[in-house]
Image (tube, rainbow, N blue to C red):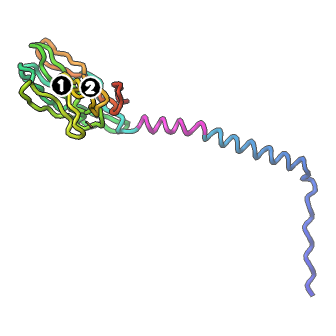
Amino acid sequence: METPSPTPPQDNSAGPAAAEQRRGFLAQAISLVLGTVTLLVPAVVGIVSFLNPLRQHGQAGRFMRLTSLDVLPEDGTPRKFPVIADRTDAWNRFPNEPIGAVFLRRVKPDKVEALQVVCPHAGCSIQYEATDDGGKFFCPCHSASFDLSGKRLDETSPSPRDLDTLDVKVESDGEVLVKFQSFETGTAKKVVKA
Ligand code: FES
């Protein structure tokens, strides 16, 4: 016949006070973990967004040499120019990449206006169309149309604002420099993209 094994002795030293102490320690540990996570999440999101290559546009926002005055027609017909620049991100440098395009138009012998080609409605590329009365810009996506200075031609235009103008400098040697920037689409206000 098998003898039953003895029940291990109970540790009576862990009374209600010890249990209370353990609960307090556990609560402190949980609140420490939650506090750390709360602090880390915004920091990680900030670092990831800072390092995101798509947000880095290198030379965008600086004046860039695009052409010379004598290339632009004297009658004010717009010409489209690609914007080529070095693009860098947190890890790499990409030399001579297309980062956008602009329409340039000579409005006086030594004065040039520049428009972003991106439609403010949803970001399609606007196009120039010659007409009997001098021409206009139009967007092939939802038919927004604009006059040559970029003003909307239609009161019910899908575009929430006029075309985006860019700053231009004409240097004494006739070189045309444009401050290239991109803007948010779908907003009535012109907001520079981060
Ligand atoms: S994207 Fe130009 S009208 Fe919609």
Q: Is residue 47 magenta?
A: yes
Looking at the rendered structure, the secondary structure element under dot 1 is loop
Quarter of the view holding residue 57: top left
Q: Nearer the viewer, residue 23 or 80?
A: 80
The image shows residue 84, relative to residue 7, as above or below, that is above
Provide the residue designation for mark 2. 162
Q: Is residue 25 magenta?
A: no
Packing grade of label 2 (10 A; few <14, some 14-19, many >=20) is many
Residue 90 x/y as whole percent: 38, 36
Q: Amino acid at mark 2?
A: Asp
Where is the C terminus found, in terms of image quarters? top left
**Left or right: 76 with respect to 159?**
left
Range covered by the magenta-colored residues: 38-51
Residue 42 x/y as whole percent: 54, 36
Q: Residue at x 35, y 38 (%)?
A: 54
For the residues labelled 2 and 1, the Cα–Cα distance comes to 9 Å
Packing grade of label 1 (10 A; few <14, some 14-19, many >=20) is some
Where is the N terminus found, in terms of image quarters? bottom right
Q: Residue at x 34, y 33 (%)?
A: 186
**Left or right: 180 with respect to 78?**
right
Magenta span: predominant SS is helix
Provide the residue designation for mark 1. 147
Residue 123 x/y as whole percent: 28, 36
